[in-house]
Amino acid sequence: KISIHLINNGKIAVKIGSENFEVTNFLLASSAIEINSWSRKPDWDKQNRYNDNIFRDTIEIFNQQGKLAVINHLPMEYYLKGLGEVSNGDLPEKIKTIAVAARGYATFYMQKENRKYHTDRYDGSDDPNSFQRYLGLGYELRSPNVAKMVDETAGEVIFYDGKIIKPWYFSRSAGRTLSYSEYCQKNNGKNCENIAYLQSVDDPAGANQTQSGHGVGISGIGATRFAEQGWDYKKIIQYYLAGVTIHK
């Protein structure tokens, strides 16, 4: 076991056995790393079976303005397998749809000109309100169907006019999706441009429902309905994101 805590000089104190160190950051690499003092239990897990505090590959910990910051460095495909944006029980084509969209979302923000966080230390966040819901190795192990669909779409992202795009996706519409321009205006945004691949489309699965999420792009409830009707993931994506292509 290794214990780490903050100290006042902007560094962290690391104790390994009987040895103590003061460092600016600390990296630990292993096939599975558990942060056993961190409670990330799913709200729905009433039996306390899970705690999403186990991670693959490399963990980096440092003092970020008086708080312990934890970074998980790992390959993109393993990141996607630990991403709790879909359920393991969802239909395969629905899972593939969201896996490709999520890969594209992360890839877009890894490009230098699109970086979302003003640091070179990390590319994303585990906060779904800011980035995507990353849960780590525990989710990967309990969601083998998600991992399988990530493998089956390995490397695939979404392009428009030859460029990787940020694919918008959300949970549920109220019968149609919103265009980006409509969403922007509703939220008092500035420069509400007309984005060609983010237009409003009918979403029959959302009829008589209440919208959940921002409403732009790929509808989760709609992707489920179309998967039930036998659509493959590329057809689903191209229905919601007009004029795009999907490839590696």
Image: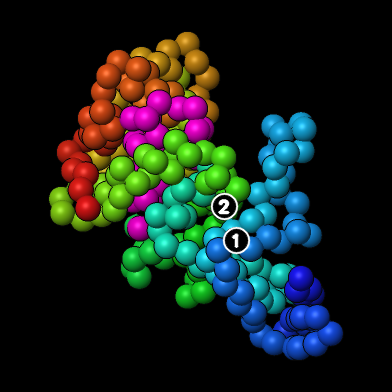
Magenta stretch encompasses residue 97: yes
Q: Secondary structure at mark 1?
A: strand
Amino acid identity at mark 2: Leu
Q: Quote the CA–CA distance across marks 2 and 1.
A: 8 Å
| CB-based contact (under 8 Å), mark 2 and mark 1 | yes
Q: Could you tell me if residue 194 is visible in this image?
A: no
Vertical placement of residue 137 versus 149, above or below:
below
Q: Residues within 10 Å of mark 2 (few under 14, many from 20)?
A: many
Residue 135 point in image, percent of width and height: 58, 49
**Quarter-wise, where is residue 243 in the image?**
top left
- Residue 172 got which mark? none
Amino acid identity at mark 1: Ala
Residue drawn at x 40%, y 26% as measured from the top left:
91
Residue assigned mark 2: 137
Vertical placement of residue 239 versus 80, above or below:
above
Residue drawn at x 69%, y 32% as measured from the top left:
44
* In this rendering, position of residue 122 left or right of residue 153: right
Q: How many numbered circles does the render carry? A: 2
Indicate which disc, 2 or 1, sits on the residue closer to the N terminus: 1
**Quarter-wise, where is residue 37 in the image?**
bottom right
